[in-house]
Amino acid sequence: MATITRVTRWGGYPAWAWILQAASGVLLVVLLSLHIIAQHFVAPGGVLDYGGVVAHLRNPVIFVLETAFAGSVLFHVFAGVRAILLDLAPSKAQERSINVILTTLGVGLFVYGLVLTLVVVTR
């Protein structure tokens, strides 16, 4: 006997995707607040030049917070672009292509940024 799976949709958008988009928005608010506090209030005199940023990023806690911030920004951006493109009612094949392209771009940009940051921080 075949099982029928029903995906709950809110406005044509899969529920899980909407929930992840909303959660990443909340995470962005939290991480942006931590970013501002760490960069401008915790660091003595504020982090204003390249050397200060590099020294600040060498702290493992700050590095993790900044990496999480970058990742959540990328996820939120690409989830938003995906939502806009899905509003155009693509076919299932086009939807799969959109998912693959946006996921590849997002992961690629995250890895690229992470590698660049690690290169700068470990010099």
Image (cartoon, rainbow, N blue to C red):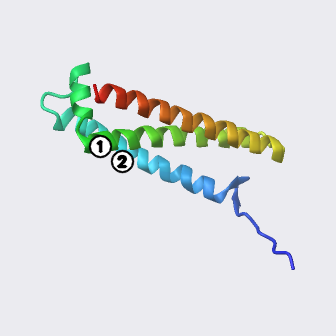
Q: Depth check: give the residue in front, 39 or 118.
A: 118
Contact, mark 1 vs mark 2 (Cβ under 8 Å): yes
110 vs 29, left or right, is right
Q: Depth check: give the residue in front, 109 or 94.
A: 109
Which corner quadrant of the image does residue 107 belong to?
top right
Residue lying at the far left of the rendered structure: 44
Q: Amino acid under label 2? A: Val
Q: Position of residue 12 (x, y in %)?
A: 73, 53
Which corner quadrant of the image does residue 8 belong to?
bottom right
The image quadrant where one finds the N terminus is bottom right
Residue at screen point 77% across, 69% down: 5
Residue at screen point 60% across, 34% down: 105
Per the image, label 2 sits on a secondary structure element best described as helix
Q: Position of residue 18 (x, y in %)?
A: 60, 53
Q: Is residue 87 visible?
A: no
Residue lying at the far bottom of the rendered structure: 1
Please determine whether, in this image, residue 9 is positioned above or below residue 71: below
Q: Amino acid under label 1? A: Leu
* Residue placed under numbered mark 2 in the picture: 30
